[in-house]
Amino acid sequence: MKKSLTGAAAAATPTRPVDRRGPRGVPAGVKTFSYRRDTVSRVWTFCTVIMTRAALKTRGMLAAITAGLTPLLCHAHALDEQLDCKSSAHSFVAALLDDRYIDPNPMRVEANSVNVFRPVRGSDLTAFGYRVYAVLGYQHDDEMFRQGSGQPVGDSAYGVVIFGPSETVEARARQAGSDAAIRPVVPLVLTAVFCNGH
């Protein structure tokens, strides 16, 4: 019969720990709340970083759009007078080409022969207080303009596409004495101002 160990000998003898796991397999005595709180804190920090980055990107996009929509007051070449629809496409576009405000090569030619010219960097063209996105023009039998694949829009037509809501653009155009056609290209963002028939 084995003798039982007592005193210091019993304390020094290693014993096999009793496995007392809870219903989820977590050892007894472990503070699961601290673990969960730490995990939630890390997840919240991660989400905050992601949300902040997304917010900054959104703010950057809104700032870019707002920059186009905000009326320009300084360092801009205004085309308001030329958009009174009393000129010709040749005169309108030729002046901008001579002053190097637009690229001489159209970035697009519509089927109706309307040539779409891009303003050069730093030109700061405006119309009725809004930045110009593109300059439009076509004149029959004029080497300045390329012919489209369809029926030409007319003998002479010109205009611009600007960053601005159509209602506000039309109100300013009428106030300036222009009878140009005003058409939304992208609602609330891009508007076409077009003179046709002169």
Image (cartoon, rainbow, N blue to C red):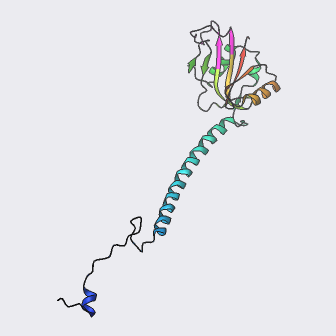
- Location of residue 34 with respect to 121 vertically, above or below: below
Compare residues 57 and 114 and report the one nearer the observer. 57
Q: Main secondary structure of the magenta part?
A: loop
- Residue drawn at x 27%, y 93% is 7
Splitting the image into 4 quarters, where does residue 164 fall?
Answer: top right
* 146 left or right of 193 in image: left
Range of magenta residues: 136-157
Q: How many marks?
A: 0
Image coordinates of residue 124 in percent, x first then y, are 65, 32
- Location of residue 15 with respect to 135 vertically, above or below: below
- Residue drawn at x 59%, y 12% is 111
- Judged from this view, the residue extending furthest toward the front is 1
Is residue 36 rendered magenta in the image?
Answer: no
- Residue drawn at x 79%, y 28% is 172
Splitting the image into 4 quarters, where does residue 16 fall?
Answer: bottom left
Is residue 150 rendered magenta in the image?
Answer: yes
Splitting the image into 4 quarters, where does residue 81 fall?
Answer: top right
- Residue drawn at x 62%, y 15% is 114
- Location of residue 145 with respect to 166 vertically, above or below: above
- Judged from this view, the residue extending furthest toward the bottom is 7
Image quadrant for the C terminus? top right
Image coordinates of residue 166 in percent, x first then y, are 73, 28
Image quadrant for the N terminus? bottom left
Image coordinates of residue 52 in percent, x first then y, are 56, 52
Compare residues 48 and 61 and report the one nearer the observer. 48
Image coordinates of residue 162 in percent, x first then y, are 68, 28
Compare residues 97 and 86 and report the one nearer the observer. 86
* 140 left or right of 33 in image: right
- Judged from this view, the residue extending furthest toward the left is 1
